[in-house]
Image (cartoon, rainbow, N blue to C red):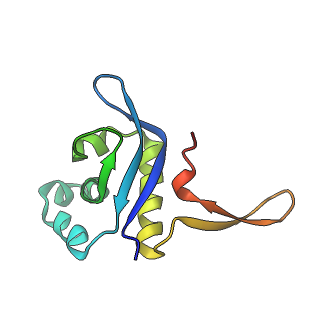
């Protein structure tokens, strides 16, 4: 069973030295990953903060960063946060990173891997 999934952020996290970190690894969430943040005062004050804590728990690698903290997630571009939220839902609900999409021009159905949407 696959428990870790690679991803590439659309924009990338920019650290304080200006280095951009795009490639990362997210693991499947555990029940405790989803329960523990509910006790956090930041979540009690603002429900939207739940995803910040949750992502900081399940992202095990982002570029060459030694650790992914809530501060790192807070400093992501909005497009990257939205990407990670969708990626989290996909791997935890479906267990895969691919989705079927239909070309709007030719109506041909293809498989797209969400892990590679950031490109390179």
Residue at x 55%, y 58% (from the top left corner): 114
Instruction: Identify whether 63 is placed above or below 47.
Output: above
Is 107 left or right of 98, judged from the image as shown? right
- To which quarter of the image does residue 47 belong? bottom left
Locate residue 50, reporting x and y percent: 27, 59
Is 13 left or right of 43, judged from the image as shown? right
Nearest to the observer: residue 60 or residue 55 = 60
Nearest to the observer: residue 70 or residue 113 = 113
Residue at x 83%, y 65% (from the top left corner): 107
Instruction: Identify whether 116 is placed above or below 93.
Output: above
Is 101 left or right of 108, judged from the image as shown? left
Residue at x 30%, y 45% (from the top left corner): 73
Locate residue 25, reporting x and y percent: 37, 54
Quarter containing the N terminus: bottom left
Residue at x 58%, y 43% (from the top left corner): 119
- To which quarter of the image does residue 74 belong? top left
- To which quarter of the image does residue 37 belong? bottom left
Locate residue 46, reporting x and y percent: 24, 55
Report the number of numbered marks: 0
Task: List the single residue furthest toward the top.
Answer: 17
């Amino acid at each position: 069973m696959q428990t870790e999934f690679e991803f590439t952020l659309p924009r990338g996290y920019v650290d304080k030295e200006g280095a951009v970190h795009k490639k990362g690894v997210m693991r499947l969430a555990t029940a405790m990953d989803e329960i523990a943040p509910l006790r956090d005062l930041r979540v009690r004050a603002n429900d939207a903060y739940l995803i910040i804590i949750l992502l900081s728990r399940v992202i095990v690698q982002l570029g060459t960063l030694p650790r992914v903290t809530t501060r790192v997630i807070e400093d992501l571009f909005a497009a990257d946060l939205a990407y990670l939220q969708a990626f989290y839902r996909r791997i935890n609900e479906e267990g895969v990173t691919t989705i079927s999409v239909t070309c709007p021009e030719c109506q041909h159905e293809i498989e797209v891997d969400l892990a590679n949407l950031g490109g390179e």
